[in-house]
Amino acid sequence: MDNSTENFAPYACIPEQSRGRLHDEPESATRSCFQRDRDRIIHAAAFRRLQYKTQVFVNHEGDFFRTRLTHSLEVSQIARSIAQNMGLNQYLAETLALAHDMGHTPFGHAGEFELEELMAPYGGFDHNAQSLRVVTNLEHRYADFDGLNLTWETLEGVVKHNGPLTGFDGAAPLPWAIVEYAKLQDLELSTYASAEAQIAAVADDVAYNNHDIDDGLRAGLFSINDIRQVDFVGRTFAEVEKLYPDLDFSRTVHEVVRRTIGLMVEDILAESRARLADAKPITVDDVRGYGAALVGFSAEMAKNDRELKEFLFPNMYRHYKLNRMTSKARRVVKDLFELFLREPETLPTEWQAGAGAPGDEITARVVADYIAGMTDRYALDEHRRLFDLQARTSEFTLG
C-alpha cells in the first residue's frame, strides 16, 4: 500500500501509527490512511475548482498559464520526490501538497488580500485557515460527517506546514477558523509539523518560484536579459546557452527551469539530511518538538531564493499589467462581499440558511466562505449578474 514501512526513516509518519480521524471509520482494505486522505482531496469539489482559480494570471487571461490546480500538482510532484529520497512518507507529503491551497480565494493573492481587509472586523481571513475549514466543514459529500474526515497528521500539516502558530514571541492572533476547530481537536499549534509537512512547504517555494519564471517570461513581463541579474538563474541560463547555442526560446526557458528545480531539490536533500544528522530525531514527535525546521534550503540557496523573489516582486507581481488585473479583482471581491453582507437574501438559498442578520459576524463568515469558494470566472459572472443592470440575475430552467 504505502511506500514500504521497512524503508521509512524512524522519524517518518507511519500509517499504522496515525493518530486517526475525528470521526472513527473502518480502515480501507486497499489503501493506507494517507493514500485515502489524498484520494478524498482529489475527489473534493474544492480541489476541482482550483482549475479555474488564479495562480498569478486570472484564468481567462490564457490557457497556457498556471492555475492553482496545476501549481498544486507541480508542488505534489516535487514533494513526493523529496520525501521518497529522504525515507519519508511520500503519500502524506503528496496529500499536503495537493491540499495546501484548497482554501485559496478567486483571483489569487488579490482576492485573499481583499478578503483579509474586509474580514478584519469579523475574526479575519487566512487561506491556510480556510483550507482547514474546507476539509473539516465546507465539503459536504459524506453521509456521516461534514468535511473530509482526514487524519490528524494531514490536518496538522495543512495548518502548520509553515511552522508553529502559537507559543513564540510575535505570534499573530489565530484566525477564527483555526480557533473554532481547536475546540474539537488539538493540532498542537505550538510545535512544528512533521517532516512531510515541512517538505510540502519548501516544495511550494520551489514550484512557484520556478513556474513564475516560466510564466513571466512567456507573458513578456520581463526578458531573459532582465532575469540574468538574478545570479543563480543567470548562471543557469549561461550554462544552457553554452551547451545549446541554437536552442529556441521556449526550449531554453524550459531547460533553465528544469535545471533550477533540480538544483533546488538537490540542495534541500543535502541540507535536510545534514540537519537531521545533527538533530538525531528518533520519532516524528522529535521532529515536531525540535524547535526549528529540519527540512529546508541551505543558507546559500535561501539567499538565491530571496534574490529571485526580490526580482519577481517588482518585475512580475507588481507589473502594471498585473496591477490592473489586481485592482479589478479586488473591486469584484469587495462589491460582492459588501452586497451579500448588506443583503444576505441575495445569497443562493443553500447559503442563506447559515447566514444571520444583515451586517453581523455570522453573515460575514458565510459570505467569506461563499466568495472564497468561487472560481475566477464564477466571481466575474456573479458580479455581472448583480451589478450589470442589463444582465440576467439568475439562470432559470424553462420546462
Image (cartoon, grey):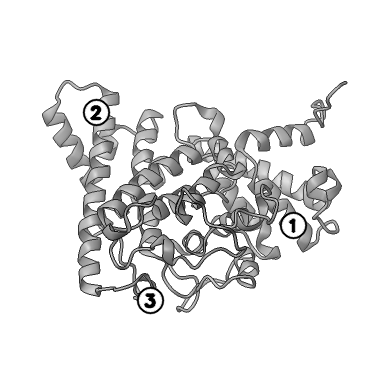
The Cα atoms of the two marked residues, 1 and 2, are separated by 48 Å
Amino acid type, label 3: Gly
Residue ID for mark 3 = 289
Question: Is residue 248 toward the left or the right of residue 184 in the image?
Answer: left
Disc 3 and disc 2 in contact, CB within 8 angstroms: no
Q: Is residue 169 above or below residue 367?
A: below
Q: Is residue 131 above or below residue 329?
A: below
Seen from the viewer's position, the closer of residues 244 and 83 is 83
Residue ID for mark 1 = 364
**x and y, in percent, of residue 389 in the image:** 82, 30
Mark 3 or 1: the one toward you: 3
Tell me the quarter of the image containing the C terminus: top right
Question: Is residue 331 toward the left or the right of residue 15 in the image?
Answer: right
Regarding residue 311, the answer to whether it shows in the image is no
**x and y, in percent, of residue 309 in the image:** 35, 50
Say few, some or many: other residues with alpha carbon within 10 Å of mark 3 (under 14 / 14 to 19 / 20 or more): some
Regarding residue 236, the answer to whether it shows in the image is yes
Q: Quadrant of residue 177?
A: bottom right
Amino acid type, label 2: Thr
Residue ID for mark 2 = 252
The Cα atoms of the two marked residues, 3 and 1, are separated by 37 Å
